[in-house]
Amino acid sequence: MIIKHYEDVSSAFIDNDVAKGVHGRVMIGKNDGAANFCMRVFEIDPGGHTPKHSHEWEHEIFIHKGSGAFLNNGRWADVRPGTAVFIPGNEEHQIKNKGNDTLVVICLIPKGVPEL
């Protein structure tokens, strides 16, 4: 069993032309012996956003803290803490922080894809 707090895991900071103010942490992944899934935590700064993208794999996201919006079939859908989001494979998506506080989301992806 592995138990760790997300603040104890180092983060990768992404801030470029396609993503703004995104801190990503691999909480549980292949280096921990996870054979099927990877759990990540993303912190998105106020005004920040992930890149608009799509990929073959599905993933599941849970909003832990803050307020934001998800690009969903070309329209933005507001989310708040306690919201769960399922994104099927090959669906274009993006997350943006619409609030004044950090948006914290938990994201699960399948094994075999880039963890960050």
Image (cartoon, grey):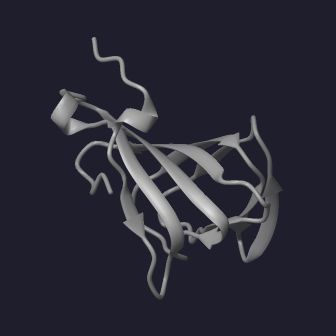
**Residue located farthest toward the top when viewing the structure as drawn:** 1
Q: Position of residue 94 (x, y in %)?
A: 60, 69
Placement of the N terminus among the 4 image quadrants: top left
Q: Reply above or below: 28 against 18.
A: above
Q: Reply above or below: 18 against 108.
A: below
- Taking the spot 80% from the left edge, 62% from the top edge, the residue there is 77
Q: Position of residue 21 (x, y in %)?
A: 54, 69
**Is 69 left, or right, of 114 in this rendering?**
right
Q: Position of residue 22 (x, y in %)?
A: 50, 64
- Taking the spot 55% from the left edge, 66% from the top edge, the residue there is 91
- Taking the spot 40% from the left edge, 55% from the top edge, the residue there is 57
Q: Position of residue 46 (x, y in %)?
A: 69, 65
**Residue located farthest toward the bottom when viewing the structure as drawn:** 17
Placement of the C terminus among the 4 image quadrants: bottom left
Q: How many marks?
A: 0
Q: Nearer the viewer, residue 15 or 40?
A: 15
Q: Reply above or below: 111 against 47.
A: above
- Taking the spot 48% from the left edge, 66% from the top edge, the residue there is 90
